[in-house]
Amino acid sequence: MPQLPRDEERSTGQPRIGTDEWVASVEGRRQRRSGVLGQLLERLGQLPFWAPLLVVAAFGLLFPFLTDSDYVVRVGFNALVFALLALGLNIVVGYAGLLDLGYIAFFGFGAYAYAVLSSNKFDIHLATVPTLLVVVVASALLGLVLGLPSGRVTGDYLAIVTLFFAQIFVTFTTNANRITLPWGDRPLDLTGGPNGIGGVDPFSLFGVEAIAVTSYFYIALVLVVLGMLALHVLSESRTGRAWKAVREDPLAAEAMTIPVFRLKLLAFAFGAATAGLTGSLFAAQQIGVFPQNFELPLLITIYAMVILGGAGSIPGVVLGALTITVVLEVLRGPDDARLLFYGGILLGLAIAIRPWQRLAAVLAGTALFGFLVHVVVGSLWPRGTARVAAQGEGLVGSIVEAWVLLPTEPGTIGNVAFVVLVASVLGMTLLRPLWRAVLLVPTLYLAAFVWENRLIFQPSVTRLLILGALLVVLMNARPQGLFGTARVEIV
Amino acid sequence: MDGTFLLQQFVNGLTLGSVYALIALGYSLVYGILKLLNFAHGEVYMIGAFIGYFVLIGLGGPDDLAVPVVVALTLMFLAAMLGSGILGVLIERFAYRRLRNAPRIAPLITALGVSFFLQSTALLLFGAKFRSYSTFQFLGGGIEVAGVRISTTRILVVVAAFSLMVALTLLVGRTRLGKAMRATAFDREAAAMMGIDVDRVIVATFLIGSILAGAAGVMFGLVFFSVYHLMGFTAGLKGFTAAVVGGIGHIPGAMLGGLLIGLAEAFSAGYISSTFQDLIVFSILIAVMLFRPTGLLGKADIRKV
Amino acid sequence: MSALLELKGLSLAFGGLRVLDRLDLHVNEGEIVSVIGPNGAGKTTLFNVITGLYRPDEGEILLDGESIAGLPTNVIATKGVARTFQTIRLFLNMTVKENVMAATYGKTRTGPLRSILRTPGARREEREVARLAEEKLAFFGQRLMGYRWDQPAYSLSYANRRRLEIARATAMEPRILLLDEPAAGMNPKETHEITELIAQLRTDGGHTILVIEHDMHVVEGISDRVVALDHGEKIAEGSFEEVATDPRVVEAYLGTKAASTK
């Protein structure tokens, strides 16, 4: 038997450069990110697995002490709930490569199951730990059932079956308050219909009831840290390898002793169990469950998190979840939203445009362009600049009022501007760099116009728009997200 | 259970089925050529319905039409089909084209994103309220068959849908473009090597599929009145189901599937409960996938290794 | 000695097309048998039937006397039938070592929960699997060793991908190894190496091998026995010389006219 040459090779110094190294190095260079941010991500990506774990744990431990506002802690809790959901989805999508669009249904199922088992609804008040056990097992079983079609159908069909399932779940929960049973005198109310189930029991662990949001924050933190650990161990285990093999090439995996169907089911069950557990936590903290909690926007949110962070990367999806939760939360308040909007555009420009002189030119150009337009329009059509900026107190408001056109009736003009903005952004992707640069200035101004006249009044719609656009842009520009590794597929 | 009620449900199912069949055709065409599940297709249909609505409003509204009914209808259909067609082509160009050779999951997620973006855009532009074509005013009347009154709109919709399907069948079966489409669906690379401009064929496919969806949107508005930003989502799911039931990538299959789903939905709404008609459609989808994954008219592919 | 793998009267048709026609074939323990035949003769289909990707219409497949026809692919694989693919099918985005380790799934037992808890048994099994993978990769000398363990499979050169695919198959520690055109696309030097390697797989690795190959030098170099197929039928069987000079084989490869003028 030939001996293992690893040490020997090290001792003889540099390995020879052959074809493989060349291929690998070209591949490596092609994927290396440039710029400050790129290098930062690169470095972060190379950290050992416990480093992000430690950061999350340490920051999480301190977080509630950094603020005295319950609201902030609740946002933190929500972020952790999303992180848990993203971790679970990562198993199904990131490892096993199955597009499970019914994922939120398991989150909802867990929440409803907890609410049914621990609330005044049916006057069942099971203790927390047994309830959670029941919820996790039941969710996993439901996951198995939903995974059943994956034995027969390919990825795309599976996506639609699961999406349909999510839809049915919402229909069911909204309507299952008047199920007519042949033997019952009056209709059975299982889910409370559109009003959901209220008065859900708090978690009670080790004899202590969790009431304060801080308690839930810590419970979620422990679960996230445990989840990251478990997922890391799992990804380098027999099962994790088999999942990845199924994702890469199901047929070859099958020929290499891997029971593909069973592993797909297992992935579904694991994802479902995670989502179910998270759902229970969510229901207990919220002291209630409502069908609206589990609709399509939630699914898009979780997918955006996983894709932004990088499917398959554990710290990636957690970071994606935290980032998006915070961004969506900030978008609620118009003041902060404005800051975030312009800040986001600046950051995007700073990453995309180099050298800095060019960036400065674009910014100066946009500023100048705006004031010019403002002056011209102001003299020709006074009503075009007559309105007061939304949330326009102080300096920011005055700048906005002096720079952005604020017509008295922004509705229709804003809509048209939005469509033009989308068209011009899309058009820019087709143009040569020179024309793109020329078009950039008016487009930026247009973006500001749309923001101040339309989007700022519709924070909830803006959030949805951003999520949808984020998915499309990411998949086209950087499908591996921030921390994922680009996958190669020979088609 | 009297015969009149049965016939009434049948007519309902036929109308709804025509709409689903048109949507299913778009799914089926695109899937046949790109093996891509275009989730955004339902949204294209929704936008078509809105375009039809705004044309109607622009012509004076249902109560006070400025032009003859026939002209109004023609304009509504043309505008919706044109607008939806352009939207479909734009979606292909900007969202999907770069991802043709990406891992399978990438275009699916993109499609989901596009769908959601369009839905939110509609919400932003048109608001969350239901809008109604209320065609009672100018499209009253109808005929009576065996005690069942069948309104003019329904007849119009079924006839229009069938004409479009016949036109599509002729287009795919008889024209050069159709031949190129079939070749591309069969083997994209080989088609490209034979001198077929695959990009053009794909654009044409999206255009045709989206035109049909736009027409379906107006038809839905004419018969069922309500138009709103979420209408595309469920209709898309059902259109896709119809395509799968008939055999995806298969044109007569999509029509058959559409009619079956429409009928199943109408009868379940009529005889069981309208709340759970989605559940019925979903069960059909699952059953077909488990027992006949190639669909009713589809043929099994030989698994190539 | 009874055959390790025995096919009796195997038939398969796609629609009206007969791809395998009452095929009998056996491979004895420790043997290297080559399957040759023109394109479309049914060679790869034969592999697909043996490994359970297609179910035969008729006939029996016996592995060590036990019928495996109709079993799921992964069960057949676990029973000891490993294969490579004509168009290499690696797990491209997994590392070299992971590729090999993944193939040990069928003979390891640790479930996901034990993996998460890192029980002693799970850790021991993981160590064994890693060691086994390293051993299998070491079979190819330096080519797949050291830093290459952690490279993704897609970064390997074509020849190394072929080697890795063979390493992955051997990690199953199969009773019989099916190699589908191992020398396809290789240059003469690499082809020569592959010939030696297949011989070594038997002498050092103790493998029984059924191989499809087009390169007659390879076939000549390795085969104990050669089976020629045409239109799914066995047209000749015997030593390389016997088969290579068989008029039906010559006819199948070169056409009737060439055979008659010979």
Image (tube, rainbow, N blue to C red):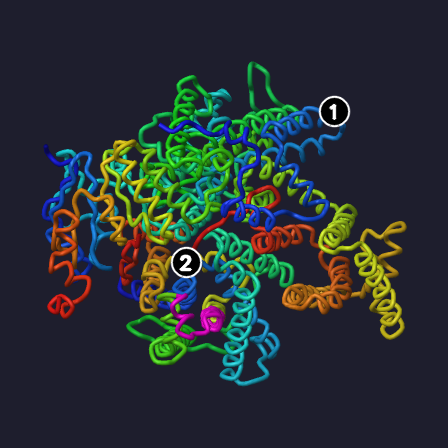
Q: Which residue is mark 1?
A: A65
Q: Which mark is residue A119?
A: none
Q: Amino acid at mark 1?
A: Phe
Q: Quadrant of residue B117?
A: bottom right
Residue at left 52%, top 54%? B112
User: Disc 1 vs disc 2: which is toward the camera?
Assistant: 1
Residue that extends furthest to the top in the rendered view of this protein: A207
Q: Secondary structure at mark 1?
A: helix
Magenta region: B188-215
Residue located beneath label 2 in the image: B238
Where is A233 relative to A371, above or below?
above
Q: Residues within 10 Å of mark 1 (few under 14, many from 20)?
A: few
Is C27 colored magenta in this rendering? no
Q: Which quadrant of the view contains residue A357?
A: bottom right
Q: Quadrant of the N terminus of chain C?
A: top left
Task: Give the prevailing secondary structure in the magenta stretch.
Answer: helix
* Image quadrant in which the C terminus of chain C is located: bottom left
How many neighbours does mark 2 have within 10 angstroms: few (below 14), some (14-19), or many (20 or more)? many
- Position in image of residue C214 (x %, y %): 26, 54
Q: Are marks 1 and 2 on the same chain?
A: no
Q: Which residue is more in the foreground, A50 or B262?
A: A50
In-front residue for pair C87/C208: C208
**Which residue appears at 11% of the width and 60% of the height?**
C247
Residue A25 at x, y = what percent?
57, 46
Amino acid under disc 2: Lys
Image-based side of C129 in relation to A197, left or right: left
